[in-house]
Image: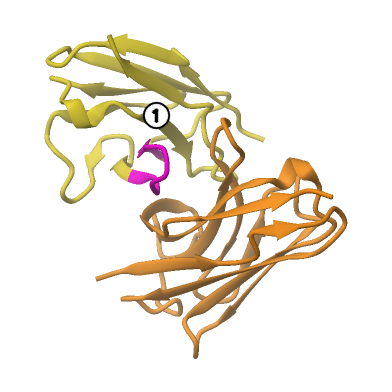
Chain colours: A yellow, B orange
Amino acid sequence: DIQMTQSPSSLSASVGDRITITCRASQGIATYLSWYQKKPGSAPKLLIYGASTLHSGVPSRFSGRGSGTDFALTISSLQPEDFATYYCQESYGFLTFGGGTKLEIK
Amino acid sequence: QVTLRENGPALLKPTQILTLTCTFSGFSPNTRGMCVTWVRQPPGKALEWLALIDWGEGKFYNPSLMSRLTISKDSSKNQVVLRMANVDPADTGTYFCARVRTQTDYDWRGYLDSWGQGTLVTVSS
């Protein structure tokens, strides 16, 4: 089974900051990687698929990169509504999610 | 507009069978490239993929849970049902259904582009 490891597990940042979250797969997954945003009490939202394709309606401050085993999600200028938990998910094996990165306000 | 909505019991006792129904609209589950899947989130923990049914009735399960899971589809009702046998308090959490857009026309894997709001299930004696 493919394991997905996110880092950091939590992150404190301020509005306007640029942040990057990383996700590592235990084996190569090409670009079969998606990113989701999850807020308490709400459904997850798809941000990026195919490692770097922005889902419709997602602000351009979100971007993704990577292939093989190493991936990253960057938010270029944090907005108040971006504080949430972020998950990566591989779609090469059994749709395994990473452990999540909780982004908190500093 | 794609919508999905989960229904299920709020409370179950250990060893019982959990039956969850996902009712959706805005897409056909029989269209190649469209699948419906279930994901759960225990309190304070990460998302966990459970099961998926594809356009051709192909069924796929999380290997660690597959002995307890059954997924099925009623296209005439636009519903997908997930059954989980022999529930345990560790199965407590919010259960989501979602639409999957596959990466190719011949494989079930893809990204979850539309989600239901989720339904909270508690397993307790």
Label 1 residue SS: strand
Task: Specify whether residue A43 is in view.
Answer: yes
Task: Specify whether residue A70 is in view.
Answer: no
User: What residue is shown with label 1?
Assistant: A85
Name the chain under label 1.
A
Q: Nearer the viewer, residue B65 or A28?
A: B65
Q: Is residue A82 left or right of residue B65?
A: left
Q: Nearer the viewer, residue A58 or B110?
A: A58
Q: Is residue A37 left or right of residue A60?
A: right
Above or below, A75 against B89 in this view is above
x and y percent of residue A12 in the render? 32, 10
At 85% from the left and 57% from the top, the residue drawn is B86
At 60% from the left and 28% from the top, the residue drawn is A3
Q: Is residue B79 left or right of residue A33?
A: right
x and y percent of residue A62 in the render? 20, 30
Magenta span contains residue B92: no
For the N terminus of chain A, give its image quadrant.
top right
Above or below, B100 against A58 in this view is below
x and y percent of residue A99 in the render? 53, 26
Q: Residues within 10 Å of mark 1 (few under 14, many from 20)?
A: many
Count the marks: how many?
1
At 44% from the left and 67% from the top, the residue drawn is B5
Q: Label 1 sits on what residue type?
A: Thr
Quarter of the image where one finds residue B4: bottom left
At 25% from the left and 14% from the top, the residue drawn is A19
For the C terminus of chain A, give its image quadrant.
top left
x and y percent of residue B13 in the render? 82, 56
Q: Which residue extends farthest bottom? A: B76
Quarter of the image where one finds residue A64: top left
Chain part drawn in magenta? A33-45
